[in-house]
Amino acid sequence: MTIGAKRILFANPFGIGDVLFSLAAVEAARKSLPRVEIGLLCNERVKELITLYPGVTTVHELDRDRFRKIRTSNPVLFLREYRRLIRSIAEKKYDVMVDYSLGREFSFLGFCAGIHRRIGFDYRGRGFFLNEKTPFEGYEKKSVAESQLEILQSLGIRPPAAGTGPLLSISPELEKRASLFFQHEALEDAGSFMAMAPGGGKSWGVNAIYKQWNPEKFAEAANTWCVESKAAVLLIGDESERELLEIVRRNLAVPNKMVCGQSLGVVAALLKRVQFLLGNDGGLIHMAHALGVKTVPIFGPVDEKVYGPYGAYADVEVVCEPVACRPCYSRFHFPPCPHERRCLEQLSVQKVLAAIAKIS
């Protein structure tokens, strides 16, 4: 390794899917530079996800919402905790920071922590504290992971070979918890299981509905496949999606169990036991894929070539309706939809079932 680095810090403040794209870059670094220690600076919501990945030595947690709140309400506490975070990063003596945050906060932390080489995307001039900047307007035309891997070339890091096995792994303790779940939830008679994630798009706020296929159609697809396969359904989502999951559940005519608000580790262990996951474009699809679970992702306004599951971890059969206006989400911007969600409304249950048949 020509740069002589011993420790690299990767930074990504976003959600499950975004961090998993970055973990592809982390994995490439781990395979190319096996003696280098790797740290990750991330938000508190994905910290548990990192426990499923063995390639990160140290996790530094930054709760940006909390920091912003206490900066206003209690400046003294803010400075104390901010200094503590800087100190924890500085103590690791990182040689390089790879910043995927697209903002100023994380590279500023790297600057304050004494990381001399700070690499990242210069998005809208926000790369002020980076000293190796790549001009950037948004992810397009190729996978997010590919774009993130490209800025590692100056470190001598190349994409890992395909077919290297799942990115995430389940601990024996989590496997045991999943076994107990299936033993005690009255689903023993089902020959197999499919999982469904009818939510997703939380980061889109009120526009999340534009990423979500109709819940009644999810139920119809599950009813058809499960009757033919003598299978049961695991409905998966976080606590904020409980009402949506209940709508799907009321329309199910097959054995089912709702898994709502469980930890990421438990959800991951349950996903390892299903035949496949059917879900909207979102974090659970990416997590299942990284676990080596077959997936059928449904894409509406977002380009699956850019934001679809990355890596040869498991079979993926993307479903989308090729209407003229999709994909309309571009460079982090979703324009108002004048077509009443036709990219999702026109997507038929039969088309989804055909995709399921290809991988199940």
Image (cartoon, rainbow, N blue to C red):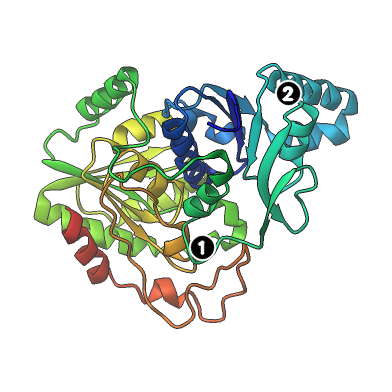
- x and y percentages locating residue 47 in the rendered image: 54, 30
Residue at the front extreme?
2
Q: Secondary structure at mark 1?
A: helix
Q: Nearer the viewer, residue 58 or 159?
A: 159
Q: Is the residue marked by circle 1 packed among few (<14), some (14-19), or many (20+) residues within 10 Å? A: some
Residue at 38% across, 77% down? 322
Mark 2 or 1, which is nearer the eye?
Answer: 2
331 w.r.t. 283: above or below:
below
Residue at 75% across, 19% down? 87
Residue at 13% across, 54% down? 227
**Disc 2: which residue:** 85
Q: Nearer the viewer, residue 222 or 71?
A: 71
- x and y percentages locating residue 177 in the rendered image: 31, 22
Q: CA distance from mark 2 to mark 1?
A: 36 Å
- x and y percentages locating residue 54 in the rendered image: 42, 25
329 w.r.t. 196: above or below:
below
Residue 101 seen in the current view: yes
Number of disc labels? 2
Q: Is residue 34 left or right of residue 164?
A: right
180 w.r.t. 72: above or below:
above
Amino acid carrying label 1: it is Ile
- x and y percentages locating residue 35 in the rendered image: 48, 22
**Disc 1: which residue:** 209
Q: Is residue 280 left or right of residue 40?
A: left
Amino acid carrying label 2: it is Leu
Reading the chain from its start, which is encountered first: label 2 or label 1?
2
Q: Is the residue marked by circle 2 packed among few (<14), some (14-19), or many (20+) residues within 10 Å? A: some
Residue at 79% across, 26% down? 82
Q: Is residue 201 left or right of residue 237?
A: right
Residue 262 seen in the current view: no
